[in-house]
Amino acid sequence: MHKYNIVLGIFFLSLLHMTHGSVSRQWRRQTSADFDVLIFTERWPLTACFVWKENSESHSCLLPKRDEWTIHGIWPTKYNTMGPQYCDRSLPFNASALAPIENELKENWIDIQNGSKPYTFWKHEWDKHGTCAVVIEALNSELNYFEKGLKLLDTYNMIVVLAKANILPGETYTIDVMLTAIEEVLGKRGQITCAKHEKTGESYVNEIRICFDKSLQLTNCDGIYNFPTNCDRNKQIIYPSYVPRYLAKQM
C-alpha cells in the first residue's frame, strides 16, 4: 500500500507538471510573436459609421474630410484563427509618443466611433495588436507601429486601388469583381468583409484587408480567418457614397 501511494503520488505530480507545462505553452502561443502574417486592415468610413449607428440611435460618427479609406489596424495573425493578441502588457500605450504624427493619425487612422475618450481607438489597437507586432524591427515601437500604418495607407489606399479597376463609391458590384480587382492591381489576393442592413437585406463593403509577411512584403491572404470574404457572393454589394442608415430612414 505504501509503495502504491508513492507511485500514485509520482503519477499525479507528473500529470500536474504536464498540465502546467501545456497551459504555459498555450498561454505563450496566444500572447507571443508566433504568427504567420500581418493583416493591414482598411475600412470604408461610411459603412463603419452605419455599423456604429446601428448599435444605438445616440451614436454619432467622426468621418474624414474627403472620400478615402481609413486605417483600422495592423494585425499579427496566425492562419485559420485570430491573434496573437495583447502580447506584452509591459508596453502600455503612451499618447505622447504619437505627438509627431498625431495630426496625420487624426486624418487617416480615425476613431469613427465619435464620443469615445481621446486616444481610445489607438490605445486599443496598440494594446491588442501593436504589442505583438513589436518583434518586427520596423514595428518595434509605438511610434513605428502607427507610422508604418500611415505609410501603408499612402501606398495601398483602397480608394486608389479600386479606382484603378474603375470601382467607385456609389455603385454596386459582385464581391468577386472586387476581389479580382484587388488581385489584378496589387498582384496578391486580399480579403473583403461586408456589413448587412437587417431591414433592407442590402450588403455594404465594410473592410478590405491585405497581407504582409514578416519582412513586410505583400503576400496573399490565403489562410487567414474568413478568407476570402464573408460577403454574399450571389448578390450585388454596395460601395456606398453616403452612410446607408439615412437611406433606410427615408424609405
Image (tube, rainbow, N blue to C red):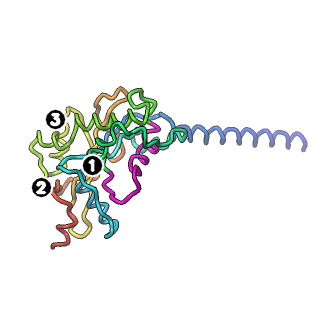
Q: Residue 136: in sight, yes or no?
A: yes
| Quarter of image, res 125 | top left
Q: What residue sits 36% from the left and 40% below the top?
A: 74
Residue at mark 1: 43
Percent coordinates x, y for residue 33 in the rendering: 48, 34
Residue 52: % across, % down? 31, 61
Amino acid type at image mark 1: Arg
> Which residues lie in the magenta part?
111-132
Residue beneath the point at 12% across and 46% down: 167
Q: Residue sitting at 47 percent across and 43 percent down?
A: 93
Numbered circle sitting on residue 170: 2
Question: How far is disc 3 from disc 2 in space, using C-alphas?
Answer: 21 Å
Up the image or down, 104 lies above or below 62; here it is above
Give the answer, above or below, for where 52 lies relative to 86: below
Assess whether residue 125 is covered by the magenta stretch.
yes
Tell me if residue 228 can be seen: no
232 up-or-down from 58: above or below: above
- Residue at image position (43%, 43%) is 95
Which of 181 and 142 lies nearest the eye of the viewer?
Answer: 142
| Residue 32 horizontal side relative to residue 176, left or right | right
Q: On the rendered structure, is 152 left or right of 22?
A: left
**Residue 185: assigned label:** 3
Q: Name the quarter where the N terminus is drawn.
A: top right
* Mark sitting earlier along the chain (1/3): 1
